[in-house]
């Protein structure tokens, strides 16, 4: 049974710092991995999608990596801004069913 | 291009009643997925519809059901509502046969059972 874990559960850093969010999964047989952002009480915004054959994806200040063999993904946020404050969720696609981590709640202090 | 749209935004029902939630996928997307996000339980997979057929369901009782219409929009029905059904229900869509078929989510329906 696929399980997804995100560390840390919460993170508070001053504006401008570079930071790394971690996601691990137990079964390497995945179709893809997707990172999402969720603002309080809102829906999910897709940030980056990494297919199982890829190692990383980049979008602006965001970079996500995938190491299937070790069951790990990281989301790197460069030069953090207060607007980056949100919960970041990692989801693994196992046979058209997303298995979710519990998320990392990120607070960027001005 | 319009995104995934869900209605209503908020829904308040009494225990024992039925709730109907609606989802319109992105134009051209054939699959619709439903997820429940209950407080303290995280996101859980509910149902997957593709080309009008139910393809998979998560570990939820039969009172959670739905359908997909010929225009690919979908309804989620929850019968005999219980207090613990209170949650944010999220709908996503994609084309599962595409080479790069990530999921696009709507803003959700907040269901409150009183």
Image (cartoon, coloured by chain):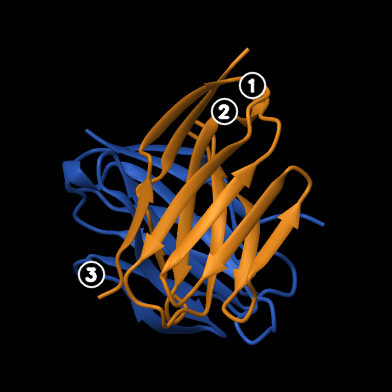
Chain letter for blue?
A: B
Instruction: Return the x and y of residue B19 as percentages of the image width and height.
Output: 34, 51
Instruction: Return the x and y of residue B5 as percentages of the image width and height.
Output: 63, 52
Query: Mark 3 and mark 1: span between their CA atoms?
Result: 38 Å
Please name whichever residue, B73 or A102, is drawn nearer the observer in this view of the structure.
A102
Q: Is A60 left or right of B105, judged from the image as shown? A: right
Q: Is A2 left or right of B70, judged from the image as shown? A: left
Chain letter of the residue carrying label 3 = B
Residue depicted at 56% across the width and 62% down the height = A34
Q: Is A59 left or right of B86, judged from the image as shown? A: right
Circles 2, 1 touching at the beta carbon (< 8 Å): yes
Chain letter for orange?
A: A
**Residue receiving disc 1:** A82
Q: Is B13 left or right of B62, judged from the image as shown? A: right
| Circle 2 residues within 10 Å: few <14, some 14–19, many ≥20 | many
**Residue receiving disc 3:** B59
Residue depicted at 40% across the width and 78% down the height = A28
**Residue receiving disc 2:** A85
Residue depicted at 57% across the width and 28% down the height = A85
Q: Quadrant of the N terminus of chain B?
A: bottom right
Q: Nearer the viewer, mark 3 or mark 2?
A: 2
Chain letter of the residue carrying label 2 = A
């Amino acid at each position: 049974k696929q399980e997804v874990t995100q560390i840390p559960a919460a993170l508070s850093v001053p504006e401008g710092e570079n930071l790394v969010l971690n996601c691990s999964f137990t079964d390497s047989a995945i179709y893809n991995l997707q990172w999402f952002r969720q603002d309080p009480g809102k829906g999910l915004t897709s940030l980056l999608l990494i297919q199982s054959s890829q190692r990383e994806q980049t979008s602006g200040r965001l970079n996500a990596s995938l190491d299937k063999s070790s069951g790990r993904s990281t989301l790197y946020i460069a030069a953090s801004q207060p607007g980056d404050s949100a919960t970041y969720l990692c989801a693994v696609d196992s046979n058209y069913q997303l298995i979710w981590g519990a998320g990392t709640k990120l607070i960027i202090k001005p | 291009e319009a995104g995934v749209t869900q209605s209503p935004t908020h829904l308040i029902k009494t225990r024992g009643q039925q709730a109907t939630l609606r989802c319109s996928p992105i134009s051209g997307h054939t699959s619709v997925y439903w997820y429940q996000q209950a407080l303290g339980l995280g996101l859980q997979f509910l149902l997957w519809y593709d080309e009008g057929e139910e393809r998979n369901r998560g570990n939820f009782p039969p009172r959670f059901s739905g359908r997909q219409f010929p225009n690919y929009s979908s309804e989620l029905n929850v019968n005999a509502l219980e207090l613990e059904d209170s949650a944010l229900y999220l709908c996503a869509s994609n084309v599962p046969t595409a080479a790069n078929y990530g999921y696009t989510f709507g803003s959700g329906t907040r269901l409150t059972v009183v």
